[in-house]
Image: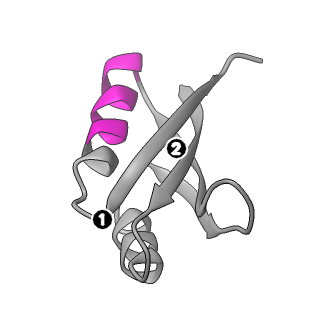
């Protein structure tokens, strides 16, 4: 099982929509709005690194996502 922390910046006034969209993705274990440098903090999991990359790409393709930082959990 592969896991990653995903930190997302959203264009203004679209945070709730993006958060709800992310929560609909089966591989998103947890997603929360946060204050600070990023707007959404999420933990995602997948069976393979390739599937993990697909989930990150799906999040990135959302029109309201400004930027994304992914940190793969290794231990």
How busy is the neighbourhood of tag 2: few (under 14 within 10 Å), some, or many (20 plus)?
many
**Could you say where residue 51 lies in the image, as x and y percent from the top left?**
32, 28
Q: Is residue 26 visible?
A: no
The one of 10 and 45 positioned closer to us in this rendering:
10
The one of 7 and 55 positioned closer to us in this rendering:
7
Horizontally, residue 59 falls left or right of residue 29, namely left
Magenta stretch prevailing secondary structure:
helix
Q: How is the image coloured?
A: one colour
> Is residue 51 part of the magenta span, yes or no?
yes
Q: Which residue is mark 1?
A: 64
Rendered image: mark on residue 40: none
**Could you say where residue 22 lies in the image, as x and y percent from the top left?**
40, 63
Q: Which residue is mark 2?
A: 44
Task: Give the residues in magenta.
Answer: 48-57
**Could you say where residue 28 lies in the image, as x and y percent from the top left?**
48, 53
How busy is the neighbourhood of tag 1: few (under 14 within 10 Å), some, or many (20 plus)?
some
> Is residue 59 part of the magenta span, yes or no?
no
Give the label, 2 or 1, closer to the camera. 1
Q: Is residue 36 visible?
A: yes
- Residue depicted at 73% across the width and 68% down the height: 35
Q: Earlier in the sequence, mark 2 or mark 1?
A: 2
Q: Is residue 8 above or below residue 47?
A: below
**Could you say where residue 2 lies in the image, as x and y percent from the top left?**
53, 25
- Look at the numbered disc 1 and give the secondary structure of its residue: loop
Q: Is residue 14 above or below residue 31?
A: below
The one of 23 and 11 positioned closer to us in this rendering:
11
Q: On the rendered image, what quadrant is the C terminus found in?
A: top right
- Residue depicted at 39% across the width and 67% down the height: 11
Horizontally, residue 4 falls left or right of residue 74, namely left
Q: Are marks 2 and 1 in contact (CB under 8 Å)?
A: no
- Residue depicted at 37% across the width and 38% down the height: 56
Q: CA distance from mark 2 to mark 1?
A: 19 Å
């Amino acid at each position: 099982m592969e896991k990653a922390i995903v930190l997302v910046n959203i264009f203004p006034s679209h945070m709730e929509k993006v958060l709800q969209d992310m929560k609909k993705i089966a591989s998103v274990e947890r997603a929360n709005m946060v204050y600070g440098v990023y707007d959404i903090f999420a933990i995602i999991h997948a069976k393979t690194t390739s599937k993990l990359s697909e989930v990150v790409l799906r999040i990135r393709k959302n029109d309201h996502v400004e930027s994304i930082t992914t940190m793969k959990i290794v231990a």
